[in-house]
Image: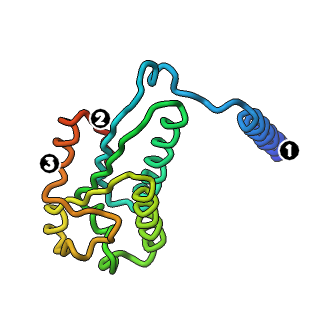
Amino acid sequence: MKTRTSIRVVALLLLGLLAGASVSAGAAPLKDTAALSGLKSAKAVFLIDSDNPRKVAHVLRLVGKTAKSMDRQGVRTKVVVVVIGPTVAFLTKDRRGISYRDMRSVAEIQKGVRTLAREGIRTEVCGVALHGRDIDPKDVIAAAHPVGNGFISAIGYQQKGYSLVPVY
């Protein structure tokens, strides 16, 4: 009797999820009208500091989607990504020190940085973090740009009107 009830509950939950998914799939895309009203352009600097390659790969995909979404909603964007801390290790050509289980995510990160570069989004890599991890700036992938200090980049871009989007 308990098993039958449990199966029914699970079945109802699944049906509810499927019904919700089909309704949202056919719905009009959500917009950011209130946040973007009156804006013609916007600038953002994403400051990424994470040792989780899956998270970083996901965030880089969202950076590109965010810029595209704002552009589609009539707001021209300028976006910069600044990578600091342990995240810099994910942007090396030889991927030295990256575990086997993280290799796929690191490959996605590097592909994401190349994709963002093609879309006009610059990625800067903190030289202080590179030095702290004994990584030569020449070992950073070509699509990323080593800079002296990622914090200085974040400060400088904020002073130029870029909104800070920290990702930790």
- Which amino acid, by three-letter code, is at mark 2? Ser
Q: Nearer the viewer, mark 2 or mark 1?
A: 2
Measuring from the top left, give residue 110's x and y in whole percent: 41, 67
Identify the element where label 3 is drawn.
helix
How crowded is the residue under tag 3: few (<14 C-alpha within 10 Å), some, or many (20+)? few
Q: Is residue 56 above or below residue 78?
A: below
Which quarter of the figure is the N terminus placed in?
top right
| Residue 20 vertical placement versus 51 (above, below) | above
For residue 106, above or below residue 115: below
Q: Position of residue 14 (x, y in %)?
A: 77, 42
Which residue is tagged 1? 4
Query: Which mark is drawn over residue 152?
Result: 3
Residue type, mark 1 in image: Arg
Q: Is residue 143 left or right of residue 20?
A: left
- In the image, which disc is placed on residue 163? 2
- Residue drawn where x is 74% and y is 34% of the image: 20
Rounded to the nearest angstrom, the CA distance separating label 3 from label 2 is 14 Å
Name the residue rendered at 29%, 68% in the picture. 89
Residue 94, quarter of picture = bottom left
* Three-letter code, disc 3: Ile
Find residue 143 and report its horizontal and vertical position in percent: 35, 65
Residue 145 versus residue 16: which sits nearer the camera?
A: 145
Residue sitting at x 33%, y 37%:
43
